[in-house]
Image: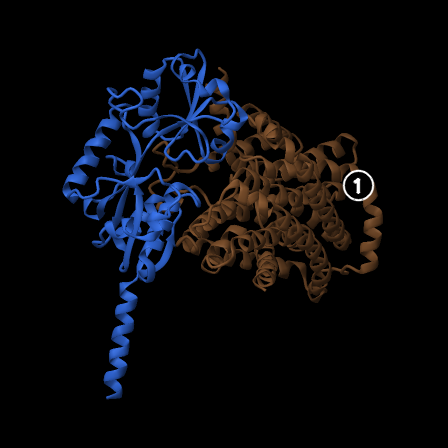
Chain colours: A brown, B blue
Amino acid sequence: METALVFIFGILSGLLSGVIPGVGGFVLMTMAYPFLLHLDPVNILIFYVTMASIDQYFNGITAIVFGVPGASMNIPTQIEGHTLFRQGKGSDAIMFSAVGSYFASMFAVLLVVALLPVLWGLYGVWTSMIQSVLLGTASLVLVYISRNKLWLSVLMFVLGGVLGQVGYREETGDAFMTFGIHSIYSGLPTLAVLVSLFVVPVLLKSYMKHPGSFDFPGVTFKGYVQVIKGIKSYWITLLRSSFLGSLGGLMPGMSFGFSSLLAYITEKAIRRSKKQYKTGDMHSLVACESANNAGVFTQLVPLLFLGIPITASEALIYNLLETRGLPVDIAWFKSTFNQILIFFVVSSFIGLLLSAKYVNLLRIFNGISINKIYSVVFVLLLIALWQTGITQYAGMSHLLIALALMPLGVLLYKHDTTPLLFGFLLSEPLIDNLKRVLVIYF
Amino acid sequence: MKKILVLLLLLIGTTAYADKIDVIKHSRAGGLIDRMNEVIALSLGDRFGKFIKVENCIQAKQIISEAKGKVITAWPTEREVTGSPCNLDNRYLLSTFSNSPYHITYFSGNEQAADMNFLKKGESVIVGVWDSNFWAPAQTEFLKTINPNIKVVRYKSKPFRTALASGEIDYKLVSFPGNDPVIGIMDGTTLLPEHKFSNMGYSMMFVGNFFYSVDNVYNSDAWESRKDLTHQPWLRGQFREYKIKFVEEMLTNLSNSK
């Protein structure tokens, strides 16, 4: 009975964290902490798996339909998916993403089962050198494939890197560009940067250049059948991105957010080299969405089999389990694997069904001016920013930081600001890895 | 009569509310300090109010000094070093809290690293330490005294977890070794007992905006069942003034290693 309730609660939480930008799994888990504290330990894991799985399906829909990436990993979804939506291909974008995501989830399950005997060997190659090469290559490709002129993309990446360094580092005792303002000692909040320097320019550009009405024909069962038949032509994309996404989940320090970006830029670079890429590319959309879902499952592996939590949410789970005073060891984690696997497979299927069924509710917006919808979305984003900041007693400061950065976003609205954003997100791990490589190898 | 009863009820309610103690969480979720704050919260039992989660130690410091309600938290000792923006006024330092010696661990199955001679005489030995400008210089000084060929690499949280498994480091210096085998403990006796940092350990203070005895935590079931068993009560039974003086001297010594 408890398991069934937890499962339903996990589905609802995944729905919420997927639909509301900035409210990620970690925020919801923190809010649900007192409730989780009383659950059976296996049910805590089931809650997390269900929530994370459902979250991925709905995160993508928000990015495609409203142009709002719920988290940094959905930026590529926004770029390709929302363009497709504006071209009247929203239904296809949603259905291909959902089916691709489901395929990737199952791929991840099979991959994990196959890799179990050689898991430690996999970690043996995960050195700082490999991480630096991956991060460095991704950064270079990202700058190269941007729509901007090369010099502008480089400049944006560097500027993003500088913004990523803002804050006080307790480990070094150094403060960078904090100007004595306490609220930025922890660095600029990711959601504030995401909203001001990515969402605002994109929405503004659409607002200025492509007025029109919200037009979403919806999805149908017949449509899904056609997409399942049509997905065959994407099989190389699916395999490649599912593998990259799975890898990101498995590797501490990489995260599936980064690997979904990696899957996206790989796909985009390949499509560009074949002169097949144009913004609003279905292959690139399928690549990033499937990588996300594959990573959701594989990120459990370090926790379940090595006892290593690799995300903040997992660290919280680990902590919760320990607080229960149980012998939380690898043997216990391994014993839960089969149950977790079943719940993941089931919740993935439910995610697919729910996203298919309830996405049609969005048709109530049909006919409303898209610019009005953007305006409402913008206000809702500010509320989400404030609300997520409140969990850290910093609602107003998060809002003010976003407003302070917004003029820059407005200034750059005609350009592709992804290099700026990824400079912000990748600079820290890149610098950190390079420092270690210098000490170890030179 | 009714009014008196209502007033009494209100009074009881207010007292009960005022008596609640909040615990500030100011560090990485799931990390050592976070776990210790969970222990403190559990030890409070019915007196526990809520967790106040903040992004950094500066915001935590602000809450400690400005909160109207009662707050306590576990506080890394190094934050009390002179010049740290997180340095708390001595009046908020209720006591020393926990201390654990650093353990030198290696990856299970790494036979080369399991040999003490490799640590002491190996020509290319790499040791990973936590990325901290405060602790790392003293740790480096100690490790280089053991073997001048030791290279010290600083790690942040996530990559540190798999650094041993990846084989890019031979040893790891941590206060809580987990399941990794331990080759040496910096407890002042087993490794270079004459060295000034031979008993260097990772420690925490117990801080808050009202007097609350740390013994209440030590005597609780939550403390008994804590995961970080190498963390023991620190200077238990000593006077508060002695504890603060001890910490000040320790921090001065460690700072001089920079």
The spot of residue A74 in percent (x, y) is: 62, 46
Using the image as rendered, state which of residue A257 and residue B241 is in the foreground. B241
Pointer 1: what residue? A234
Q: Residue at x 76, y 60 (%)?
A: A218
- A428 to A196, vertically: above or below: above
The spot of residue A297 in percent (x, y) is: 63, 44
Using the image as rendered, state which of residue A8 and residue B54 is in the foreground. A8
The quadrant in which residue B188 appears is top left
Using the image as rendered, state which of residue B11 and residue A233 is in the foreground. B11
Q: Residue at x 83, y 41 (%)?
A: A233
- A29 sits left or right of A58 in the view: left
The quadrant in which residue B42 appears is bottom left
Q: Is residue B188 visible?
A: yes
Using the image as rendered, state which of residue A234 and residue B196 is in the foreground. B196
- B237 sits left or right of A150 in the view: left
Is the N terminus of chain A in the top left, top right, bottom left or bottom right quadrant? bottom right
The spot of residue A384 in percent (x, y) is: 51, 57
Crowding at mark 1 (Cα within 10 Å: few <14, some 14-19, many 20+) = some
The spot of residue A19 in percent (x, y) is: 60, 57
Q: Secondary structure at mark 1?
A: helix
- B150 sits left or right of A68 in the view: left
Chain ID at mark 1: A
